[in-house]
Amino acid sequence: LSPQGIIVTAPTVTATLNGYLFLKNVVFRMMYNTFRRGTPAYNKLESLKKDSAALQKLYLPNLVKSLAQVDPENTRLFNQRLAEFHPRMVLNMIDDPKDADRAQRIRHSCKQFLGLDLEHLGVIYRDSLQDKALASRLPVIIYKPQSLISQAVYRIAEKIMHSATLKFDDDYDITQASDFSFQAAEEEATDDFSAKMSYVEDLIGTGALTTGELAEAIKQQQYEISHLKAENLLLKKKLVEAARQGFKI
């Protein structure tokens, strides 16, 4: 698996948060694939995992330092693999030039909280031509090769083509799921909400998200919840009415 995967995100609150959350999960997956069961670092992680809230708020660079104290050999290997991991980002659906500044703030968050060097490949502005190209069932670079969006795609593709090819060490396979990934699936699902809230705090602290944007996202979620409740009541009413008419529910 290439250590140079590309994340395509947008300057909205949800997209930014999900992109950061994905990268953090990848780093923890790398950690559990490096610190095998029975190693001192694995046991340390298991003890920290008992307090999931504290683990989520712990800066990853500080966590790595604490692991180095109990398992220096495997921690050196993890640091080597983390240094080999160079994810790249494309900021899509930009409406305002100021939105492009968010890429730098996301990069700063990844460096500060995850110890990751995130490469920025470029931005793609929102363009109505994309909708027309989709309606025509043609790639936009064929439909309008000289358009703004097509030129942005070409620039990003050129950067990818001219970048050096990197790879993980031969002994490392990030696609191999560890036992932990299956055992912790249910726990991770339970902790998702609290984890996301800690990521929100990280991103607000570095300016990647503003409190105004967060408030707007909460308002949108409240609206969606209200809409779902209304739909639920309507369906419940229909089910009750059907039962009264003799239908089996």
Image (cartoon, helix red, strand yellow):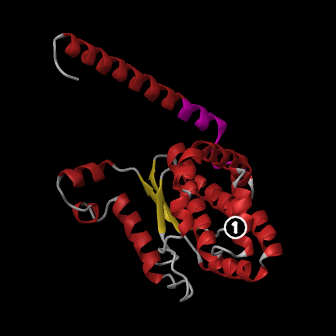
Q: In percent of the image, x 68 and y 74: which residue is there?
A: 38
x and y percentages locating residue 128 in the rendered image: 31, 47
Q: In percent of the image, x 57 and y 87: which residue is there?
A: 169
- Who is closer to the viewer here, 65 or 71? 71
x and y percentages locating residue 129 in the rendered image: 28, 51
- Who is closer to the viewer here, 158 or 22? 22
**SS type, badge 1:** loop
Name the residue type under label 1.
Gly
- Quarter of the image where the C terminus is located: top left
Q: Please provide the residue range marked out in magenta.
A: 206-218
Q: What residue is pinned by disc 1?
A: 115
Residue 123 on the magenta segment: no
Q: In percent of the image, x 60 and y 80: which residue is there?
A: 84
Q: In percent of the image, x 72 and y 68: which residue is there?
A: 43
Left or right placement of residue 32 versus residue 146 in this view: right
In the rendered image, is residue 9 in sight?
Answer: yes
* 237 versus 55 height, above or below: above
* 239 versus 224 height, above or below: above
In the rendered image, is residue 97 in sight?
Answer: no
> Which residue is situated farthest in the right direction here?
69
x and y percentages locating residue 112 in the rendered image: 72, 61
Magenta stretch mostly in which secondary structure?
helix
* 149 versus 80 height, above or below: above
Crowd tier of the residue under label 1, counting other residues whose Cα lies within 10 Å: few below 14, some 14–19, many 20 or above: some
Left or right placement of residue 129 versus residue 213 in this view: left
